[in-house]
Amino acid sequence: MLRRWDARQITQYQNSNDRENIMAENLNSGDARSTTTGTTGLVHDDQHVAEQSTGTAGSTDDSLNSYQKRHRRVPPWIWIVAAIAAVAIIVGGVFAYRHRNSTGSVAATSHSISIGLKLAPTNLDIRNETGAALDQVLIGNVYEGLVARDADNAVVPALAKSWTVSKDAKTYTFTLNAGERFSNGDALDSKDVAWSLNSLISNDYVNAQALANVESVSADGATTVVVKLKAPDATLLWNLTGRAGLVLDEDAQYDAKTQAVGSGPYLVQSFKQNESLTLKANPHYWGSHKAKTQTVVLRYLTDDNAAINALKSNNVQVLAPITENLSSSVSKDGNFVVKAGDDTDKFVLAFNGAGSKTSDKRVREAIRYAIDNKALISSRGGADAMLGGPIPALDPGYENLTKLYPFDQAKAKKLLSEAGYNASKPLKLDLEYANIYGTEIGDQLRSQLKTVGIELNVKVVEFSAWLQDVYTNKNYDLSLVDHNESHDFYTWANPDYYFNYDNKQVQDLYAKAVSSTTNSEYESYLRKAARLVSEDAPADWLFNYRVTTAYRKGVTGFPLNLNQFQLPLWNVQYRA
Amino acid sequence: MRFLVRRSALLLAALFGMSVLIFLALRVLPGNVASVMAGLNATPDRIARLRQELGLNRSYPQQYLDWAGDIIHGNLGVSVLTGRDVGVQILSRVQITFPLILLGLLLSCLFGIPLGCASILASHAKVRHGLHLLALVGGAIPALWGAMLFILLFSKGSGLINIFPSQGFPDNGWKQPGSALVSLVLPALTVGIIVGSSILRYTRSALQEMLASEFVNMGMACGMTRVQAVLRIGLRVVTPQLVSVIGLTFAEMITGVMVIENLFGLPGIGSMLVTDIGNRDLLTVQSELFVLAAFFLCIGFVVDVLHRILDPRLKNAALLSSAGGV
């Protein structure tokens, strides 16, 4: 145990002598005292150290004391100077480093670009898996439909270069472009189109109800497709821009959950669930939307702060969406552009039409009057638009209905007292919504409704629990969902939908709209129906969400409108 | 040997109990994978057909037996949502979470144990109190805040000193070992500081007790200095305790590092569990949970065995007690 003892150790040993003497005493003095040995020893040790530091000799032997380490007092100003110097060196180094990093880059078009998105698809099976996250990345990039949507949500040619509609509006004849190919090299012809649409209907894949009016789809020669309808359907063309109109390769064999074979400008190189989707330019691409950037990596960043860090650290060059409230740090930075685009997302606060309290129209109206939509929008950063009814500005049949139920607390209180609620018997309501929308919006609604005497109990749950409680069982008072689908007025004409909204007049008007043969007729019926719905107050359309996108300077061709539902990437380029 | 057999039997019984518990607990959750797959605007027919296809209509005992049978055969199943093998999925996530935890634990031991010793042995009272304060403050740092601070200080792009990447893991994973390791530095530092503080506190209090013990007194009576006695004898005696703390911390951190994984965009086990539970992909979740629970139990097993090896006294105690029992 005792190795070479040098003089210093001997000093230490001697220094601790008196403590050990005490310990020895303690040991001798029996059990009762020996239990306190440690603490006594400790206290004594402290005193001992204090003695040492004040310079009292540890030993009576001067020759040993001369080996002892002495604690020299350093004047405080030296510490201050040293600290200032250290800080100055670090700061100087940091600035030098940053300066070095910020210079010396040469502008060149990049072969790859990374884009940060928020909601990730669980798999790539576009025929069985729902969710806008899948439409967003695959339609127009990997899969193509007969027709497509442009940035203003209008129908434009895609696989079909043109189409004609018969006089009775029951036969649509599409002509395909020549030389169309899938990414595996297979030719795409009218047979693939007919097979895709027919199998969608017969297997009831996602969105098959969009083709409910279709009687038959048949190929007529290699480039002509004839779609026959049971009755005129003004929504058909638009429906074909979505999943219902996608053309898949009948002969291709692949695992649809992790791979995709389509005819678009990109093909799927790899897909990591919740992490990233890598698209590569399709070498067999046939059309005019040839990919300008070879590789596009879509990264899924669920945490808003992490997403902004990724943008700032150039891990992604584009972030869509960026949370409006957090965007100020990015927009102040001269390297980025932050812009909002139009969208069809409707934040719908639905009132259960069959609920025990919300079936009373006065209650529903009171809630609409009590909500200050402007305050909601400004607290979210101010990019969103006011919305007074079920149809947003980018959809047919839009009319500004925000005047119907303006923010008016006095009116809300009056309606509530007419309905039999007062301070001693307040109206108590439950609001249930999915946690993806955050807790702030629920808190705000609770405080807004509190001022008119409504007690709102907010339940923020997982999406699957919401699906069970609200969507399937319709067991709710108030529910909040972002209905992001475009052209979805049909939900208000469906009495079985979770809204429990059953208005014969609206249903008739919608049926007339669908069967109308001209666009203006279609839109005027929809407009009338939308006004009726809004007047009935089956919901409050809190706002029309507008997506905010942030991108690094040098990025061009990134779509700003509607980019959470369709994100055509062929035109995107990054010049570093 | 007898100990090993008994301990293994306990492990197996616990695994069985765990599997039943996991299975039942998940069935209590509202919602199901069929309606999540079908989404909004789906017809009830479609949901019913999906339920049929996914086998959600079978009775619970039937579902349990099918699943347990697969597990015994080493088959963790295939996710109905992603179409991927659950085992492969866990493996790919483990490749990120485990290195992160190991690196974090390594840092925390490097930081916690020496400072823990110093906080007892430092000659200056100020230093000792300072270290105690450091342990308290370090332990009180919320993971999220600490991580944000590290990002602000060291991350590429948004940091003051931009040296470390703060987002994501390289696409090729460990095929690029350099950049993979670098991407774990900041998260591991965060883990290291927080866990290190608790190890510091633990070491400190364990050694504090040691100071008052006969072990140290004996050592010093044999002529060791106090420092020598504490480090050579005291630390050796508390090692088994420290090993159990570190082992349990490891197990706890598998899900505990979730916040950190999320913030640094690392696709680890925590985020996998949260998404799968959110999607009600129950078959996948129960396999994942089972693997994790099994891992937990195995760590407990290893810690117990290590205890035996590190602390010969336990062996004698067991011998005595079993002898007494007979």
Image (cartoon, grey):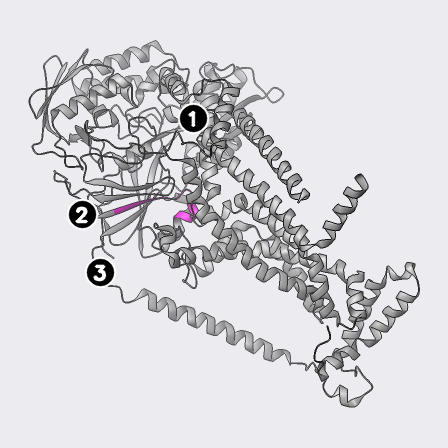
Q: Nearer the viewer, mark 3 or mark 2?
A: 2
At numbered mark 3, what does the secondary structure look like: helix, strand or loop?
Answer: loop
Residue A99 in view, yes or no = yes
Measured in 3D between alpha carbons, the distance from the residue under mark 1 to the one under mark 3, in whole angstroms, is: 48 Å
With respect to residue A247, does A352 lie above or below? above
Can you identify the residue that label 2 sits on? A292
Q: Position of residue A366 (x, y in %)?
A: 47, 22
Q: Quick check: do tags 1 and 2 share a chain? A: no
- Magenta span of residues: A296-307
The disc labelled 1 sits on which kind of residue? Val
Q: In which quarter of the image is residue A258?
A: top left
Measured in 3D between alpha carbons, the distance from the residue under mark 3 to the one under mark 2, in whole angstroms, is: 16 Å
Q: Quick check: do tags 1 and 3 share a chain? A: no
Q: Which is more N-terminal, label 2 or label 3? A: 3
At numbered mark 1, what does the secondary structure look like: helix, strand or loop?
Answer: helix
The disc labelled 2 sits on which kind of residue? Lys
Q: Where is residue A437 in the image (x, y as percent from the top left)?
A: 44, 35
Can you identify the residue that label 1 sits on? B33
Dot 2 falls on which chain?
A
Kindly identify the residue that appears in the image at 72 percent across and 65 percent down.
Answer: B230
Q: In which quarter of the image is the N terminus of chain A?
A: bottom right
Residue B157 in view, yes or no = no
Q: Seen from this angle, which residue lies furthest bottom?
A: A63
Can you identify the residue that label 3 sits on? A107
